[in-house]
Image (spheres, rainbow, N blue to C red):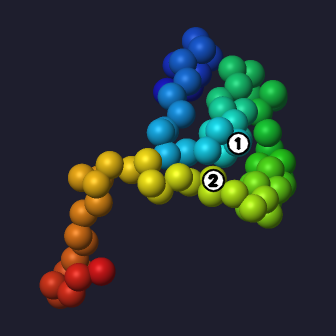
Amino acid sequence: MEANVIEGYRLEKPEHCHRELYNIMYYCWEAEPKDRPDFADIVNRLELLINKDMDYIQLERFPDHSYYNLQHLDGEKL
């Protein structure tokens, strides 16, 4: 996978993901590891994003068929 990043491959932005959240992921895929944010920087960026009054995951963009009923092993639905 790292070879793919070095060669410039990046995952596309998921449809339900806000651009600012995707940008944080994108910065983590810099070809040069030294150019990638460290953990503290990622935490800071996420804190700034969380404190904004916005929907950073756009649930209305999920197709209806993406939802599934999950069950505990004892059969109780979640």
Q: Quadrant of residue 76?
A: bottom left
- Residue 18: give x, y in percent of width and height: 61, 44
The tag on residue 20 is 1
Extreme top residue here?
Answer: 7
- Residue 55: give x, y in percent of width and height: 63, 57
- Residue 66: give x, y in percent of width and height: 29, 53
The tag on residue 4 is none
Q: Which one is nearer the viewer's eye here, 77 or 18?
A: 18
Is residue 13 visible in the rendered image? The answer is: yes
Residue located 74% across and 28% down the image? 33
**Dot 1, crowdedness within 10 Å: few (<14), some or many (≥20)?**
few
Relative to 49, residue 29 above or below: above
Residue located 25% across and 72% down the image? 70
Mark 2–mark 1 CB contact (< 8 Å): yes
The residue carrying mark 2 is 56
Horizontal arrangement in the rendering, residue 55 relative to residue 59 (left or right) = right
Judging from the image, what secondary structure is the residue with disc 2 in? loop
Q: Quadrant of residue 43?
A: bottom right
